Image (cartoon, rainbow, N blue to C red):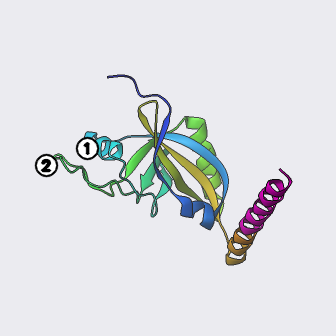
Amino acid sequence: MAKERGRRVIAQNRKARHDYHIDDTFEAGIVLTGTEVKALRAGRASLVDGYAVVMNDEVWLQGVHIPEYSQGTWTNHAPRRTRKLLLHRKEIAEIGAATRESGITIVPLALYFKDGKAKIEIGLARGKREYDKRQTIAKREADRDAARQLAEHNRRRG
């Protein structure tokens, strides 16, 4: 079998970018069991309720749902089990220092395969207030209108 190359996204947490200001992002490996990897290769996972915590100089992913593998037997995994994230010691120290600051949380942003290995992108996030969310939506709509008008203008000229 040929080696897998590139990045294949399994799940994204679009709501995280809507609900939080993402200050910094990190790429981490995940400690998984065999049936979890097979379920991910089938393209099934949910990051919606997920978050990460730093305990004993290790980062743990909690609340991420990887459903049971359909062809699995009694060796199947628990769908919402706590999973260890693999990061460099300096990154763990940076994340730990940031989360001790009030209002900062670690949220999973994307789960993907990179060159055949399961990776997760986590972000240091600060919660948005309701008016920030409205501003983000208004800016996105204004950008869309401007792009639409520019395209219409270019169509008329050309």
Q: Nearer the viewer, residue 88 or 142?
A: 142
Tag 2's secondary structure? Answer: loop
Q: Amino acid at mark 1?
A: Thr
Q: Nearer the viewer, residue 51 or 99?
A: 51
Residue 111 drawn above or below residue 102: above
Residue 129 drawn above or below residue 31: below
Quarter of the image holding residue 88? top right
Taking the spot 17% from the left edge, 45% from the top edge, the residue there is: 75
Extreme-bottom residue of the structure: 130
Residue 16 visible in the shown view: yes
Taking the spot 47% from the left edge, 51% from the top edge, the residue there is: 55
Q: Position of residue 90 (x, y in %)?
A: 60, 37
Is 106 displayed left or right of 113 in the figure? right
Tag 1's secondary structure? Answer: helix
Taking the spot 18% from the left edge, 47% from the top edge, the residue there is: 72
Going from the N terminus, do you reach mark 2 or mark 1 first?
A: 1
Q: Position of residue 86 (x, y in %)?
A: 47, 38
Give the labeled residue for mark 2.
74
Residue 128 drawn above or below residue 13: below
| Part of the protein shown in magenta | 139-158
**Marks 2 and 1, how far apart in space?**
11 Å
Q: Nearer the viewer, residue 61 or 36?
A: 36
Which mark identifies residue 75?
A: none
Give the labeled residue for mark 1.
35
Q: Position of residue 69 (x, y in %)?
A: 24, 49
Q: Amino acid at mark 2?
A: Trp
Q: Position of residue 124 (x, y in %)?
A: 62, 54
Is 111 displayed left or right of 106 in the figure? left
Decide whether the magenta segment is chiefly helix, strand or loop.
helix
> Would you say the residues marked 2 and 1 are in contact, meaning their CB atoms lie under 8 Å apart?
no
